[in-house]
Amino acid sequence: MGDLLGVAVLGAGHMGADHIRRLDHGVSGARVVSVADPDTDRAKEATAGIDGVQVHCEPQAALDAPGVEAVLVASPGAAHEEALLAAFARGLPVLCEKPLVPDAAGALRVVEAEARLGRRLAQVGFMRRYDAEYVRLKSLLDSGRLGRALMLHCTHRNVSSPSHFTSDMLINSSVSHEIDAARWLLDQELTAVSVLRPRPSGNAPEDLLDPQFVVFETSGGALVDVEVFVNCGFGYQVRCEAVCEDGSARIGDGHSMLVTRAGAACEEVAQDYLVRFADAYDREVQSWVDATRQGRVSGPSVWDGYAASAVAEAGVRALHQGVRQTVDLAPRPGLYEDDGNRPR
Ligand SMILES: NC(=O)c1ccc[n+]([C@@H]2O[C@H](COP(=O)([O-])OP(=O)(O)OC[C@H]3O[C@@H](n4cnc5c(N)ncnc54)[C@H](O)[C@@H]3O)[C@@H](O)[C@H]2O)c1
Ligand SMILES: O[C@H]1[C@H](O)[C@@H](O)[C@H](O)[C@@H](O)[C@H]1O
């Protein structure tokens, strides 16, 4: 390995371009050596000014470029399985944006492929585990000072949804973050899910079931509710309140500035995830680069990615069938035994 970890980035859209900038000059220890995007103009724009970077249309060509030692996958979820398997075939460590693979069967194939390798190679981009507020909440819950957690109340609001967004994606793209955060915060599995559908907002695109209200049951008897509203219009808001036997703790209100002028106090609200979670993405990518250079893999595992997809798939069934759905997880391979999130 050279002085800097050589990274291939697959996908140069919103997230890919942000990660390319971050790898180039936001974190230390890495350099972008190749980028693949079928929209090569987009890839060229995202890599402008980066010395020696190769731009390809085909992901495989970017993986085979000289100097590639690791891969960051930021293509759409439907392309992740192929990208992960191609990286595994080359023995390349991966940071894969969420969702690991949107459908549970595809995600399980990735788990099985990594288990066959007999070593972990991939980390999933559930960046909330690196957000300072989430980390504080996790450490408070783990300390036991609030007693056992009984409920999590979560809010997940986006200003607007991209044109390709579907009603299923409110669960398997947006709520996938709350699924992972709840499994991690509570150290429990999510075992069942129900989805309620309020009347859709008139500001949402026609036919999009937005907002939705999702309720998860956990292996430890807790409840997790999520209001997901991806066309709320006013801001990017992610909140979580843990209600425990001996107290409660809430995060997600502190990411703003209070401006007072002309007789009014006005609190600014972040407009998107790139602002709200900027620090978390930085810490996530720095931690991935550091671990990879040391030959380690840390962070949310492929098993965590599979579990999130299996829970989300049950959620999508609940959305359409209108009744509570249970979550069936495949047996966990031994490779992931030390991952935490053991049902208890
Ligand atoms: N962690 C987060 O908070 C967060 C935020 C946004 C998006 N994401 C995830 O990042 C991924 C990308 O989302 P986005 O918002 O950047 O999407 P986007 O549509 O802005 O960009 C995706 C890019 O990938 C390219 N692409 C399509 N197929 C490809 C392939 N097979 N190989 C390489 N590139 C391909 C497209 O041309 C496009 O430029 C998704 O998995 C999404 O869920 C995560
Ligand atoms: O892909 C994005 C991303 O994961 C954001 O963090 C989330 O807030 C959006 O709802 C989702 O569409």
Image (spheres, rainbow, N blue to C red):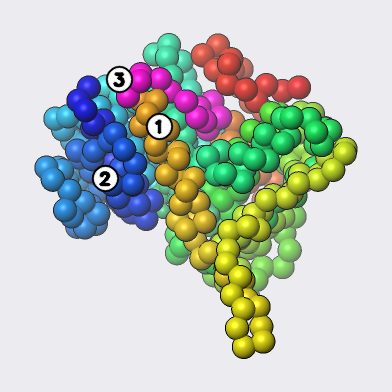
Residue 79 colored in magenta in the image = no
Badge 2 crowding class, 10 Å Cα cut-off, few under 14, some 14 to 19, many 20 or more, is many
72 versus 16 height, above or below: above
Residue at 21% x, 58% y: name it: 45
Q: Residue furthest right?
A: 245
- Relative to 295, is 234 on the left or the right? right
Range of magenta residues: 293-305
> Which residue is labeled 2 in the image?
24
Q: CA distance from mark 1 to mark 2?
A: 14 Å
Residue 298 colored in magenta in the image = yes
- Relative to 82, is 7 on the left or the right? left
Q: Position of residue 118 (x, y in %)?
A: 43, 11
**190 or 314: nearer the viewer:** 190
Residue at 39% x, 47% y: name it: 76
Q: Position of residue 333 (x, y in %)?
A: 55, 14
> Which residue is labeled 1 in the image?
288
Task: Tell us which disc is closer to us: 1 or 3.
Answer: 1
Q: Position of residue 183 (x, y in %)?
A: 66, 33
